[in-house]
Amino acid sequence: MSELHVMDHPLIQHKVSMIRDKNTGPKEFRELVDEIATLMAFEVTRDLPLEDVEIETPIKKDKFKMLSGKKMGIVPILRAGLGMLDGVLKLIPAARVGHIGLYRDPDTLEAVEYYCKLPTDVEERDLIVVDPMLATGNTAIEAIKFIKERNPRSIKLMVLIAAPEGVKQIQDAHPDIDIWTAALDEKLNEHAYIVPGLGDAGDRLYGTK
Ligand code: URA
């Protein structure tokens, strides 16, 4: 069963409250999303494997822990996921980056993948899929479905704000995927916006509204 991790670190909570504020403009919004993504990446990578490496300090040679070279990938879901990318890369600079974009066909209402470029060695990589808002869960479910067709080693989903409806949908559709969120909000409204949420994350990031 997929696990939900809600990050209640005070720094994360403070910054999430700031991006909720409708008076926070795009520049500050982008900076905060970047910082939150970095703080979240710290926790999402807690299970990275370590190995003993011999290092000589000025005093003595000894064995010390270092990352054991696990191959990682970060996959923002276009477009709002891009706002979280650099923040995660700050902590995992060697990660490769993939992109996935979907739109909903207005006639069939099916999600259609219009862009997907993942690292060529994705089968050896552990991926973190990033998207700020987990609302109905439809986009993330479809994105993860398309990504799974390329057989990555594992997938984690990292979002800023989740609605309980979206969490349940992901857990039903992808019980093998763990979810990390900075906040679990109340519900969705009739327009599928998260309440209280922060509005449209893409528009807030890029000032398109
Ligand atoms: N997407 C957003 O950007 N905001 C929401 O509240 C829901 C979906």
Image: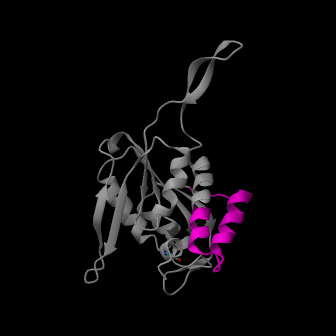
Colour treatment of the image: one colour
Does the magenta segment cover residue 48? no
- The residue at the far top in this view is 60
Residue 193, horizontal then vertical, whole percent: 52, 80
The answer to whether one can see residue 164 in this image is: yes
Residue nearest the viewer, comparing 209 with 201: 209
The answer to whether one can see residue 5 in this image is: no
Q: Is residue 71 above or below residue 68?
A: below
Q: Which quadrant of the figure has residue 65? A: top right
Residue at left 41%, top 63%? 77
- The residue at the far bottom in this view is 190
Residue nearest the viewer, comparing 195 with 83: 83
- The residue at the far front in this view is 27
Residue 80 horizontal side relative to residue 108, left or right? right
Does the magenta segment cover residue 20? yes
Q: Which quadrant of the figure has residue 101? A: bottom left
| Range shown magenta | 4-33
- The majority secondary structure of the magenta stretch comes to helix
Residue nearest the viewer, comparing 103 with 188: 103
Q: Is residue 64 above or below residue 134?
A: above
Residue 200, horizontal then vertical, whole percent: 51, 77
Residue at left 29%, top 50%? 150
Q: How many marks?
A: 0
Q: Which quadrant of the figure has residue 5? A: bottom right
- The residue at the far left in this view is 107
Residue 204, horizontal then vertical, whole percent: 53, 75
Q: Is residue 22 above or below residue 57?
A: below
Residue 124, horizontal then vertical, whole percent: 36, 39
